[in-house]
Amino acid sequence: MDQVTFYWAIAATVLGGIQLFFQKVVAQEKRDSAFNGLMMYGVSGVAIYVLLFIQHELPTDWRIITLLALTGGALHGLGNFVRIEALKYIDSVLYFPMNKVLGPLLVVVAGVALLGDPLTLQQYIGIGLGLTVPLLLLSAAEHHRQVNLRQGLIFVVISTVLTAASVIFTKQATSYGAAILFVLAMSQTAGAVSSVAILIKQKKSHLTLGSHLDRRDIVLGLIAALIGFFSAYTLIRALSTGLVSLVYAIHAHYILIPIVLSVWWYGDHINLRKVVAIVVSFLAIILLYTA
């Protein structure tokens, strides 16, 4: 992996971790996850369209790019909603490790089988080492700390499959040329539309849409929009120059940030095994970078 791609991937990982921590905040406070997603995609989407208007640039293959990016954005929007719902039932220290092992595994398989990613032995070892982290993070004791373990696990699988698929579609969209902002604009648009659809479906039995929302929802939504914009931009930049298997394998280590922040802020459970898992994650990233 070249240095520039690695730096973009690390930036996306850090920002993605912070973004997911705020999703944990939304879930912990029982806020409206669909509204939060709408704010994240909608506000950042408006900013992106302004930048596109200033650039006056439309990619040559804009039709196929639009199709791929819209699909990726819609899948990510649905995955984002389900992720927050999952965090209402299980701890972040349980959700994120499971999401980490399943997501990269799906993306690596798709990257190698569908996109032909030429991985080396060291890179496979680095990916494999990263996938062992959940073995350190999970234990039978976690079961007793969950609100609804079964429901949470179902949401984990659904959200992970959706977000993994969105990464593949987004990667394909970036392969048609340097159209980062255009891909991001289409992706954010689809994410906003999917969030609106979910929000309307949730509130169809209520007389006033969003009547329960307060200032805190708006603040969390604006924070999500700001962080979400830079998180998505850096990830797409990394995907545009690197192999999807490696970029996403590194990006999956975002779980370290919300786990640490959740332990500090909410008092989520942690032990020595989880500290060791953090060390293993760093070793895996080093292997992927130096290969």
Image (tube, rainbow, N blue to C red):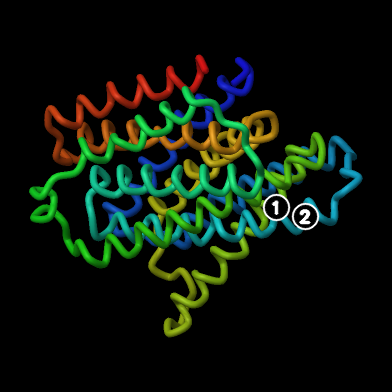
Tally of marks: 2
Q: Quadrant of residue 73?
A: bottom right
Residue type, label 2: Thr
Q: Residue at x 48, y 60 (%)?
A: 35
**Label placed on residue 66:** 2
Q: In front: 274, or 182?
A: 274
Percent coordinates x, y for residue 250 in the rendering: 47, 30
**Label placed on residue 22:** none
Q: In front: 141, or 31?
A: 141
Percent coordinates x, y for residue 122 in the rendering: 47, 22
Q: Residue at x 28, y 26 (%)?
A: 278
Determine whether the residue tagged by mark 1 lies in a helix, strand or loop.
helix
Determine whether the residue tagged by mark 2 lies in a helix, strand or loop.
helix
Q: Quadrant of residue 277?
A: top left
Residue type, label 1: Ala
Q: Residue at x 27, y 58 (%)?
A: 88
Q: Is residue 102 above or below residue 258?
A: below
Q: Residue at x 52, y 31 (%)?
A: 12
Residue position marked by numbered label 1 in the rendering: 69
Q: In front: 204, or 267?
A: 267
Percent coordinates x, y for residue 54 in the rendering: 84, 36
Query: Distance of mark 1 from mark 2, alpha carbons?
Result: 5 Å
Percent coordinates x, y for residue 140 in the rendering: 10, 50
